Amino acid sequence: MVTITRLDPPTLPTKYRLTVEQYYKMAEVGILKVEQRTELIEGEIIEMSAIGTKHAICVSNLSELLTLKTIQIAHVRQQNPVHLSDRSEPQPDIALVKRPSSLYVDCHPKAADIFLLIEVSDSTLKYDREVKTPLYAKSGIPEVWIVNIEEQIFEVYKLPNQDSYEQVQTYGKGELIPMNMFADMAIAVDDVF
């Protein structure tokens, strides 16, 4: 006769979450290579997707348009980190931040410095919607745009509330996206695609 002893359910291993300081130390000592494209999200190192041609031209077009429209008011940063917490330093495709750019010589822009974050999405659409956008809302980023390359639309997220946005609108070909953070400014969807 075999006796079966009931065991307590196994506990899952605890994930170790890195801080931004530890993340940079890993790069400094060579654990993370310079050519690796990574970002730190909620303490986890995330390897970023390769940049395809459609993605690259979309980011370039947006950067040029935003620079021309906001040169006196804001600084446009392309694919550079923003510091959201001790455990999150994502790299949005575009960050429209307060001027002067000299504010960011010793630190990356923080949530209070950011007017708008833009993620250009082809293969990362689900990740940008379900992971990064809630992180941005939780951090109080006032406005986020996801550029859906496949469908050629912009998803515009406004009014952060905990880990989501209260207002979401989509804009397609032939439409203008109002830049509510700056009076009387808009971006034409057709100028991006």
Image (tube, rainbow, N blue to C red):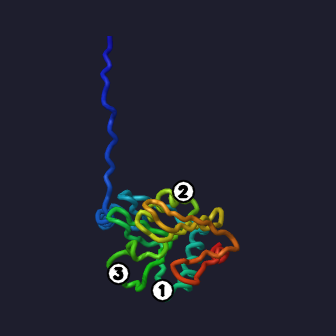
Neighbor class of circle 3 (other Cα within 10 Å; few <14, some 14-19, many 20+) is few
Return the residue found at the far bottom: 72
Label 2: state its secondary structure: helix
Look at mark 1 in the image and give the residue it sits on: 73
Question: What residue is rendered at 42% in x and 63% in y?
Answer: 138
Gap between marks 1 and 3, in whole Å?
A: 18 Å
Depth check: give the residue in front, 68 or 175: 175
Q: Is residue 110 above or below residue 126?
A: below
Give x and y (percent) for residue 74. Answer: 47, 83
Look at mark 3 in the image and give the residue it sits on: 105
Give x and y (percent) for residue 82. Answer: 40, 71
Q: Is residue 60 above or below residue 119?
A: below
Of the residues shown, which amino acid type is indicated by label 3? Answer: Val
Number of labelled discs?
Answer: 3
Give x and y (percent) for residue 83. Answer: 37, 70
Label 1: state its secondary structure: loop
Look at mark 2 in the image and give the residue it sits on: 126
Label 3: state its secondary structure: loop
Q: Splitting the image into 4 quarters, where does residue 139 fall?
A: bottom left
Q: Is residue 74 above or below residue 38?
A: below
Mark 1 or 3 closer to N-term? 1
